[in-house]
Amino acid sequence: MFKQAHKISTLIASAGALLAGMAGSAAAAELQVLQRYPLGGEGGWDYLSYEPQSHRLFISRGQHVQVVDPRSGAQVGDIPDTPGVHGIALAADQGKAFISNGRDNSVSVVALASLTTLHKIPTPAGENPDFIAYDESTQRVVAFNGRTHNASVIDAKADKLLATVELAGKPEAGVADGRGQMFVDIEDKNVLQSIDLKTQAVTATWPLAGCDEPSGLAMDRATRRLFVGCHNKTLLVVDADSGKTVARLDIGDGVDANVFDAERKLAFSSQGDGTLSVIQESAADRFALKQTVPTARGARTMALNAVDHQVYLVTAEFDEQPPAAGQTRPRRTMKPGSFTLLVVGEK
């Protein structure tokens, strides 16, 4: 009887060791660019959004939104009449997408099933709506207005503008906590602000010491940690309840987006210098740079596929010409047909 029990315990221990080894191997898996799909088409780009239900990637392209299947690189749709488009907020529970149009100061409401525009919501007090985000707990969409330094709060169910919230400065990225709070980077003031979407008021303003021009923002809702990408090649991890910085990590140059994979506990930071920083969270206040993935120059914005654990980025090739009269920066023109989708995942 003792020998049989000993054998069983040995088998259990061996199985545990095998599973632990497999888990450790999976955690240590390297990421790389798996695919490069030429998309072509006209227009620059800004933010991306991924819809897991239909495997569709929404890409802002200047005057329209290009919709592709990132599994094949095939275009599956196009949303026209989005002048100066910046971002796409997906409200799957409402069957809608909300698109920020920077040039005509409006938010397009699009039916996800058909990709047809239902109508536009003007933002008369908000000029140049840029980053846009959705909070499912309050069914509110927030468009952050770059020129007027405020935020337009929209009822996603009624497609109605509810309020305009004044901010401390120029807003960049925002993220919802799923409890009715929306956080936003204030780029020109180096602060982070919190908005209560129920009262439609700013409830906190936290200085980001050591952060120059915060641009990207993501969140681990379970630990309530915010990931703030800064233009001085720094990523700050901030406590969403106290505003305290709990970690500081080095990233690449030219950050413009952050995302968080909750299942893998990985934070990503995409930079225009052609790098993707991958940060492992082992506890609420323990973080380490796991890997720096070479991507492509200009691949500064991204979207996360949290089901397949892949990251999608886009970029293009440019021709540079001497600066125009009175200017210091060279003129850059996108090479025709060079716009490309990059898929990053495990080897």
Image: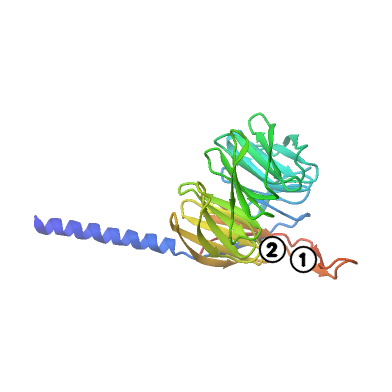
From where the camera sits, is residue 112 visible?
no
- Amino acid of disc 1: Phe
Residue picked out by circle 1: 318
Residue 2, image quadrant? bottom left
- Residue 266 image point, x, y percent: 50, 57
Residue 345, image quadrant? bottom right
Viewed as shown, does residue 157 lie left or right of 345?
right
Mark 1 falls on what kind of element?
Answer: strand
257 or 165, nearer to the observer = 165
Viewed as shown, does residue 54 lie left or right of 149?
left
Farthest top residue in view: 158
* Dot 1 alpha-carbon crowd within 10 angstroms: few under 14, some 14 to 19, many 20 or more: some
- Residue 18 image point, x, y percent: 31, 61
The residue under the point 60% across, 50% down is 192
Viewed as shown, does residue 88 lie left or right of 42?
left
The residue under the point 77% across, 51% down is 62
The residue under the point 52% across, 48% down is 240
Mark closer to the chain start, 2 or 1: 2
* Dot 2 alpha-carbon crowd within 10 angstroms: few under 14, some 14 to 19, many 20 or more: some
From where the camera sits, is residue 334 visible?
yes
Residue 81, image quadrant? top right
Q: Is residue 310 above or below residue 127?
A: below
Disc number placed over residue 115 in the picture, else none: none
Q: Is residue 332 above or below residue 188?
A: below
18 or 236, nearer to the observer = 236
141 or 114, nearer to the observer = 141
Residue picked out by circle 2: 298
Mark 2 falls on what kind of element?
Answer: loop
Q: Are marks 2 and 1 in contact (CB under 8 Å)?
A: yes
Using the numbered discs, state the Cα–Cα distance from disc 2 to disc 1 in whole angstroms: 10 Å
Q: Is residue 276 above or below residue 203?
A: below
